[in-house]
Image (tube, helix red, strand yellow):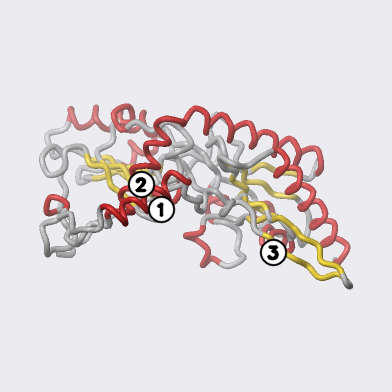
Amino acid sequence: MYGRVVVHCVPAGHHYFVYFRIYMDYNATTPPEPEVIQAISEALQDAWGNPSSNYIADVTFVPVSKVTARVEVEDIIAAVRPNTCLISVMLANNETGVIMPLQEICQRIKSLNKQRERLRILLHTDAAQALGKIRVDVSDLGVDYLTIVGHKFYAPRIGALYVNGPGTKTPLYPMLFGGGQERNFRPGTENTPMIAGLGKAAELVTSNLSDYESHMQRIKLYLEERLQAVFAGRIRFNSHFLGSDILPNTCNVSILGPRIQGWRVLSNCRRLLASVGAACHSDSGNRPSHILLSCGVPSEVAANAMRLSVGRETTEADVDAVVEDLRETVQLLEEMN
């Protein structure tokens, strides 16, 4: 299946060996489901017609706890100032998989809004990594805005912004001006096929989330068990933090030892396709992840980190092959050293 395996041939004398590469970077992107591709194709065929100032802001960055790797509720409240107008917190971290206490943050801020004689503080969350992996309900969370990213849950590369009562209950202003599409909030012809694909992917998540979540959780636990067994005493899970819940599919792991940095291991693996961190931070080169360092992970451990994220199609056989690939690669690098 595209997005999960590719074929790689390596010449050896007069023979060719075929290796099926195994994709474990589902936090970077996911392949669209067959139903999503069908929805896009149908929309391209049947719905091809046309459907229709700079400001200066003062920003406060709140660090995460080095114990829980979460942004703590009390730290958010302590950072609120008389002129605070917006609080934005990601729902789940894209490298560690740690889930933030967003519902509690929203409850506390709404209590503050009731006590203060001022415009209310608005609440936004980036739910890119959470959608399709855990239950996400805007009513339960209590947010005013929620960011949706399609290619994280088997949809095309298109996004959406949920707004609780756009322009009436919750302020929303256009960044661009021109046509009157999308209720005058965003000019430009709508990309109907991609919108159809996003809708179909969301429908699949609504219908199948329990199965998706339990499968990914089971496979991730099996992956961690196999890594622990093969690299006993040399493994550090950078996604395990006291008191924090994590996404069911994310395993951030370091194999301890000199000259087996995560990027070096992954670039020498024959079968495993994964990354050392978020694709949006790929310009950081081979430096340790600033996210892991912020969470209290030692620099020498963070340098060896790899983010392995399983998907809906990942099997135990895939895990076995990946762990063996890692074992052989680490052994090779250590012999080279």
List the residue tagged with mark 3.
267
Measured along the vertical axis of the image, is residue 48 above or below residue 130? Answer: below
Q: Residue at coordinates 42% horizontally, 36% vertically from top-left?
A: 204
Q: Residue at coordinates 84% horizontally, 61% vertically from top-left?
A: 332
Extreme residue in the front direction? 45
Residue 152: percent from left, percent from top: 45, 48
Disc nearest the viewer among 3 and 2: 2
**Distance of label 3 from label 2 (alpha carbons):** 33 Å
Residue 99: percent from left, percent from top: 47, 36
- Residue 238 visible somewhere in the drawing: yes
Location of residue 119 (image quadrant): top left
In this picture, residue 262 sits left or right of residue 78: right
Q: Nearer the viewer, residue 166 or 258?
A: 166
Q: Nearer the viewer, residue 42 or 77?
A: 42
Residue type at the position of mark 2: Leu
**Distance of label 1 from label 2 (alpha carbons):** 7 Å
Residue type at the position of mark 1: Pro
In this picture, residue 259 sits left or right of residue 98: right
List the residue tagged with mark 1.
156
Q: Nearer the viewer, residue 98 or 109?
A: 98
- Crowdedness of circle 2 by 10 Å Cα count: few (<14), some, many (20+)? many
List the residue tagged with mark 2.
198
